[in-house]
Image (cartoon, rainbow, N blue to C red):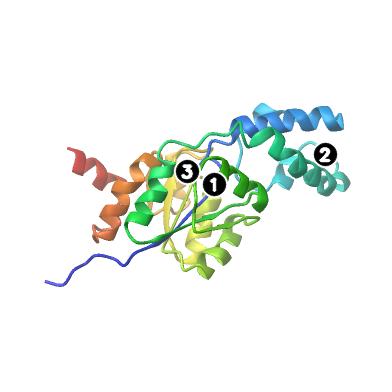
């Protein structure tokens, strides 16, 4: 009987609220931005809607003509306030390791400013094969296609759209601002609670176990 094992995969991961809990660092940076500019930003509100590009959040607080310069200032301030304050999410390192153990490649595709994304990963000792920043939602498909990604993992409906645009398997994790039902409605092929479930899912996916869905994980544990 022929093997149904899929080839070694290339797996893309989102960064904020998928691999890292960036809320404490981003909150600290917004508080510092408020002090620096004199314009109030509700940092506690802002960190509840992470995912879209920085400029979309700044548009809630700054006049249109100030957004570009304020975004540059925020990115300049970011390393001092956000990197050390940001932990890895549970299962993040193990998820990347699972891809490597399967003989695959792990890449990070994020809307975050790429130099700052790389600082986070270096600080936390995570070493993906590539990091591509500055891409949001459907734009992520450009990098996913370029790197031949079979799977893309993210916490936002925008990540699901990016995966589907690229023709990649859309794996959602309910560790960010979007709930499981919202992620399913957006078209996720599978929704996991967080990345601690990813290695088991990946093993099932590679073995050709249907779509490797979360229900299969539950059945396997029973």
The Cα–Cα distance between marks 2 and 1, rounded to whole angstroms, is 26 Å
Q: Position of residue 175 (x, y in %)?
A: 47, 37
Q: Quadrant of residue 151?
A: bottom left
Q: Nearer the viewer, residue 202 or 78?
A: 78
Q: Which residue is mark 3?
A: 182
Residue at left 63%, top 33%? 25
Label 2 environment density (alpha carbons within 10 Å; few <14, some 14–19, many ≥20): some
Estimate the x, y position of residue 46 in percent, counting from the top left.
Answer: 67, 34
Q: Nearer the viewer, mark 3 or mark 1?
A: 1
Extreme residue in the left direction = 1
Q: Secondary structure at mark 1?
A: loop
Label 3 crowd (10 A; few <14 / some 14-19 / many >=20): some
User: Looking at the rendering, in which quadrant would you find the C terminus?
Assistant: top left
Q: Earlier in the sequence, mark 2 or mark 1?
A: 1
Which comes before the other along the chain, label 2 or label 3? 2
Which of the 4 image quarters holds residue 193?
A: top left
Q: Label 1 belongs to which residue?
A: 15
Residue 59, visible in the rendered structure: no
**Regarding mark 2 in the picture, which secondary structure is present there?**
loop
Q: Residue at x 42, y 41 (%)?
A: 180
Does the residue at mark 2 contact the one at mark 3 (Cβ under 8 Å)?
no
Judge by depth and name the residue closer to the eye, 66 or 189. 66
Sooner in the amino-acid sequence: mark 3 or mark 1 = 1
SS category of the residue bearing label 3? helix
The residue where tag 2 is placed is 62
In the picture provided, is 168 more to the left or to the right than 199? right
**In the image, residue 170 above or below residue 218:** below
Q: In the visual, does 209 lie left or right of 68?
A: left
């Amino acid at each position: 009987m022929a093997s149904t094992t899929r080839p070694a995969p290339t797996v893309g991961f989102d960064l904020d609220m998928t691999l890292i809990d960036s809320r404490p660092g981003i909150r600290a940076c917004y508080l510092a931005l408020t002090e620096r500019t004199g314009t109030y930003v509700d940092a506690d509100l802002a960190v509840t809607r992470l995912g879209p590009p920085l400029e979309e959040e700044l548009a809630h607080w700054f006049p249109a003509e100030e957004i570009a310069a304020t975004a540059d200032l925020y990115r300049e301030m970011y390393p001092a306030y956000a990197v050390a304050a940001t932990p890895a999410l549970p299962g993040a390192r193990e998820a990347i390791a699972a891809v490597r153990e399967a003989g695959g490649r792990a890449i990070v595709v994020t809307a975050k400013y790429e130099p700052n994304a790389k600082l986070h990963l270096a600080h936390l000792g995570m070493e993906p094969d590539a990091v591509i920043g500055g891409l949001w939602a459907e734009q992520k498909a450009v990098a996913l296609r370029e790197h031949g990604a079979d799977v893309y993992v993210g916490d936002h409906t925008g990540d699901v759209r990016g995966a589907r645009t690229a023709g990649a398997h859309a794996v959602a994790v309910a560790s960010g601002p979007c709930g499981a039902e919202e992620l399913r409605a957006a078209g996720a092929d599978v929704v996991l609670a967080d990345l601690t479930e990813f290695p088991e899912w990946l093993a099932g996916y590679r073995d050709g176990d249907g779509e490797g869905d979360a229900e299969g994980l539950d059945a396997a544990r029973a």
